[in-house]
Image (cartoon, rainbow, N blue to C red):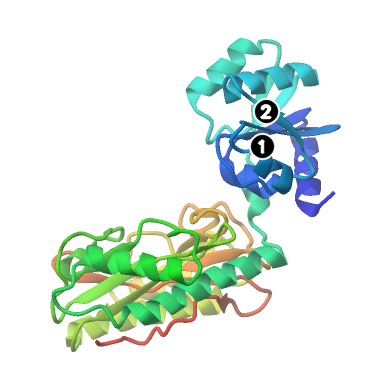
Amino acid sequence: MNRRLINLYEKMSAEDVDALLITKISNVNYFSGFSGDSSALLIGKNFRKLITDGRYMEQAIIQAKNFTLVEQTEGLYKKIVDEIKISGCKKIGFEGLIMTVAHHSYLKKELADVEFKSVELDTLRQVKDAAEIENIRKACKIADDAFEKILEVIKPGVREIDTAAELEYLMRRLGSENAAFTTIVASGWRGSLPHGTATDKKICAGELVTMDFGAIYNGYCSDMTRTICVGKASDEQKKIYNLVLDAQLYGLEIIAAGKGGVEIDAAVRERLDNAGYGRFFVHGLGHGVGLEIHEEPRLSKLSKCEKLLPNMIVTDEPGIYIENFGGVRIEDTVLVTNGKAQALTRSPKTLIEL
């Protein structure tokens, strides 16, 4: 039995449940190896079942070798009910943070004698193994290579949306399975929008352009942001850029195993506060990256992570966003170690003036 399943059984014991019902697709993938959708895992002390439909049976045979395959033909949740009844389990752990009210109500109605307990499984994915880290490294390399090439495309008159499309095309050509999330390209005044996804606005000379994008390799994501200037940057643009760069590099210095998410976020935030720009940093410093682009642990005021562990992967992405001026964000995907954190995205961070 692999380490992921061992950890899952330990979680089952700690939660005092007879079985776990896993319906979040990223967790289905993580624990079984199966990468299809519209499926679920039902795992008990003496059984492991993958419930899917006819579209995926051949794929499941190849990918989910440690699981008994159950084909559903009348609806996923109807088959889940049938399999829970067959198992005889009376206390089921389920992913309450993602299950819909409708599905939960259906299970309670059809299984009135079964107790359902909400459990959190995402935290079991926080520490990455060697294969996961290698996949994320490759996703980061794809993003880095795409960034180098996109600099040849950006010029006055090019639309944000065309820049985003070209970035995504480049990543696909370089081996990405898809974009890790909706690509952000925010130029000029739109740079003050932290999630300013690309529009038909044309990039103008003298504008800062923030690009936030990521690749997917073997199911694993990368996440990086770079801000450049089209033409010569003004003194104010250089000032804001250098403040963000200083904060980002400081984040890389202090991200380490043993430190908490709130602690790290606060330290970087204080750096911008002391420079007089803290109020313009409006989001958390970072988040976990893996099978999902946003996962645990978080580096933020609301982080639940008391101590980072070696081989966690997080982002380091401070930003300053000023209405009618624009914004700057610089972001790396970062590997946590016992010593100095390692940036897995390697693109230059000194201000590029095209």
Q: Amino acid at mark 1?
A: Met
Label of residue 57 in the image? 1
- Looking at the rendering, which quadrant does residue 71 occupy? top right
- Looking at the rendering, which quadrant does residue 314 occupy? bottom right
Residue at 17%, 71% in the rendered image: 188
Q: Amino acid at mark 2?
A: Glu
Residue at 32%, 83% in the rendered image: 242
Label of residue 181 in the image? none
Residue at 65%, 53% in the rendered image: 125
- Residue 197, can we see it? yes
Residue placed under numbered mark 2 in the picture? 71
The reply, left or right, for residue 53 in relation to residue 18 is: left
Q: Are marks 2 and 1 in contact (CB under 8 Å)?
A: yes
Mark 2 lies on a secondary structure that is strand
Mark 1 lies on a secondary structure that is helix
What is the crowding at mark 2: few (fewer than 14 residues within 10 Å), some, or many (at least 20)? some
Report x, y in % for residue 274: 34, 76
The reply, left or right, for residue 12 in relation to residue 95 is: right
The reply, left or right, for residue 87 in relation to residue 151 is: right
